[in-house]
Amino acid sequence: MAKLQVAIDLLTTEEALALAAKVAPYVDIIELGTPLIKNMGSTVITAMKNAHPDKLVFADLKTADAGQLEADIAFKAGADLVTVMGAAGNATIIGAVKAAKAHGKGVVVDTIGYPDRVKRAQEVIELGVEFVELHAGLDEQWTAGYSIQVLIDEAARAGVPVSIAGGVNIGNVAAVIKAGAQVAVAGAAIYGAEDPAAAAKALREVIDAV
Ligand SMILES: O=C([C@H](O)CO)[C@H](O)[C@H](O)COP(=O)(O)O
């Protein structure tokens, strides 16, 4: 069964916990966005894991160097999954995977900004990561002509476990899952909704029906 990941791109622990409390019944993975972690530090990871011990807490570190050290900090704080940039060297990814194995946790590689996301996904899966995020970041999404269809097409030919992030919403989530994504990541479609719980519930229902 495919998973739903809520990406919390809010800026304070208080706001993040309030959102998570509303949407937790409908999501499998709670992502603490990079801006949130940069603003609050690793304490937000601990607070979220304490509030939702039954959920996978995803620390979107977007690590580019010192993979083992940064991953270790997040796992010690309570993260279940951390991200390392696909553009980082393999040594950085291998270091983070080493930390993950020591804690019984996992690493996700984020392909944001990488020219050939599918090729990199196929390379890094060999390094022991859990899955690869086919990701168009917020800045890319705001670029004229952006369409999530690019990521959907990539997922269909990746042949390795992937998530899709980059404007997932109620109108495209079925296509995201049908393309083979194991995880659909939704940020603004949930935290930006008038009723985040209803938005998460609707996404969950589509995912479960595919
Ligand atoms: O990872 C993200 C981005 O880099 C900012 O932290 C987003 O959470 C991710 O792109 C999903 O967000 P939406 O595109 O708003 O669904």
Image: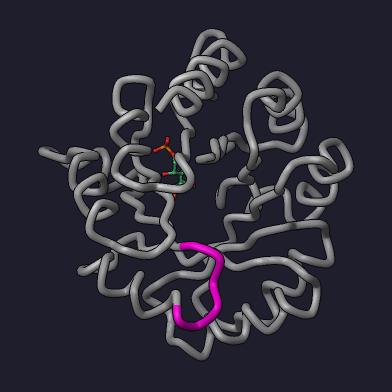
Q: Position of residue 78 (x, y in %)?
A: 82, 57
Residue bounds of the magenta highlight: 126-131
Q: Residue furthest bottom?
A: 91
Q: Residue at x 25, y 48 (%)?
A: 151
Q: Position of residue 186 (x, y in %)?
A: 47, 34
Whether 95 is drawn above or below 19: the answer is below
Q: Residue at x 59, y 34 (%)?
A: 10
- Residue 129 lies within the magenta run: yes
Residue 16: tell me if it is visible: yes
Would residue 180 be found to the left or right of residue 192 on screen?
left
Q: Position of residue 155 (x, y in %)?
A: 29, 53
Residue 9: tell me if it is visible: no
Would residue 50 be found to the left or right of residue 102 on screen?
right
Q: Number of callouts in the render?
A: 0
Q: Residue at x 31, y 49 (%)?
A: 136
Q: Residue furthest left?
A: 145
Whether 108 is drawn above or below 52: the answer is below
State the quadrant of the C terminus. Answer: top left
Q: Position of residue 200 (x, y in %)?
A: 55, 21
Q: Nearer the viewer, residue 2 or 146?
A: 2
Q: Residue furthest right?
A: 50
Q: Residue at x 28, y 33 (%)?
A: 175
Q: Nearer the viewer, residue 151 or 36?
A: 151
